[in-house]
Image: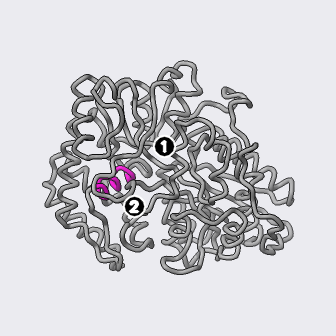
Amino acid sequence: MNTITRRGSLALGIGALGTAALPHAGSHAAVPAANMEPPKHAIEKDATLRVARPVKFVAPDETIFRQNTARFTDATGVQVRVDFVGWEDLRPQTAVTANTGAGPDIIIGWGDDPQLYASKLIDMTDLAEYLGRKYGGWKFLAPIYGRRWKSKDWISVPMGGADIPCAYRISWLHQAGFEKIPGDLGQFLALCRKLKEIGHPPGFPLGNAVGDGNGYAHWLLWSHGAYVADEDGTVALNRGETVEALKYAKALQDTCISGTLSWQDPSNNKAFLAEEISLTINGVSIYFVAKNDPKTVPIATDMDHAPMPSGLAKSTPQVPLVINAMAFGHTKYPNAAKEYIRFMMEAEQYEPWLNGCLGYWSNPLKAYDQAAVWSGDSKVRIFREGFDHEFWSGYKGPIGAASAAIAANYVTIHMFAAVVSGQATPEEAAKEAERQAKRYYKA
């Protein structure tokens, strides 16, 4: 099995896949609107760019991204340096860049992080409106993450989202007496208890995991009708629904493999591929590695994905981990920065990247729903829906600096971890989390 490190990648080398293994734009390609002129951004003389973005979890993510960047250089003459940054290190680097006015010109950062630094970013409204017109409009979550809250001003361009449904082993699910992942919370808990009983426990991350940990905590809250803040930004964590979510998390934790309180984003991937767990919440990366490594192909054959149970939510209570392109005001080459982002989102570059990642990044623009990857392997089709989910970081409240700070400081993860570890009662944990959240919303 591939070695998985805290800051490393799960992926196989691109050479191990072979060119034929990479989906490409074809008969199902997105069809942009004809004769759509991009906004005029005259690239500055002798422009150079430095870009930072998250480290890959699947190899083509980096390989095709670098290829697309090289195409931009070939087309424009702009030299571009791309740094792939560890997931836990990207937020601190973004903060340093914003606060010092030095560093990368563009950071493709996490979710609502642009809201923390909105005053220090280049306006993206003309670019975002152009892309929306050309590619069938933006999907539900894109303007929530790309605009200032309840305005039409774009401060970033969402490039993709790593959705995190349930990944599970089919045969073990059947062995436990279930034909599919239940949508009912009680039945889901019964499934997890049975899986533990037959020696195939689940595992859910509750360490400081940027993607899976925050995603798991969000699902626990929203599936119980709980949420961080009301529509007006009033913190609403210390409520009965949150207490019920915390009690449920404790019961679910009792079915899990040990050690999940320290799990980072790669940890559940490693455990699943080692056949230590039967079920988890994750992006497509487990399946991608299993499918492309001869030693783990049997795991890929015997696994699938399904929405996490909706519980009390009216729709699937998930949110993808969004990657969000922002250009900082300190750049000497703002036009080059905007042109680079535009170039990477155009079909000629975006679709091969989207297809090559096998659904790891879901698309924010509607036209890309027709990309070849979504009409191919049925086990990855679910990931197309990432930007259609009607939940977001800080739901139901406004997306902004407060929601970004809560995600960055793992407030909800720590709340659940305190209960499942026995360090606090559900009531104590909800009260403490509300106290912490209020600091950010008042700020």
In the foreground, 280 or 212: 280
The residue indicated by pointer 2 is 407
Contact check, label 2 and label 1, Cβ < 8 Å: no
Residue 411 is drawn in which quadrant?
bottom left
Q: What residue is drawn where x is 86% and y is 53%?
A: 74
The correct choice, above or below, for 45 with respect to 151 in the image is: above
Residue 215 falls inside the magenta stretch: yes
Q: Which residue type carries mark 1?
A: Gly
The residue indicated by pointer 1 is 283
Residue 201: x, y in percent?
Answer: 29, 30
Q: Residues within 10 Å of mark 2 (few under 14, many from 20)?
A: many
Residue 433 is drawn in which quadrant?
bottom left
In the foreground, 386 or 393: 386
Residue 432 is drawn in which quadrant?
bottom left
Left or right, 211 with respect to 355, comes to: left
User: What is the distance, in whole Å, between disc 2 and disc 1 at their CAs?
Assistant: 18 Å
Task: Assign a secondary structure to mark 1.
Answer: loop
Q: What residue is drawn where x is 41% and y is 45%?
A: 307
Circle 2 or circle 1, nearest the eye: 1
Q: Range of the magenta residues?
A: 214-223
Magenta region, mostly helix, strand or loop? helix
Q: What residue is drawn where x is 65% and y is 63%?
A: 106
Mark closer to the chain start, 2 or 1: 1
Residue 197 falls inside the magenta stretch: no
Q: What residue is drawn where x is 69% and y is 35%?
A: 22
Residue 79: x, y in percent?
Answer: 80, 57
Residue 151: x, y in percent?
Answer: 53, 81
Q: Which residue type carries mark 2?
A: Ala
In the foreground, 416 or 97: 416
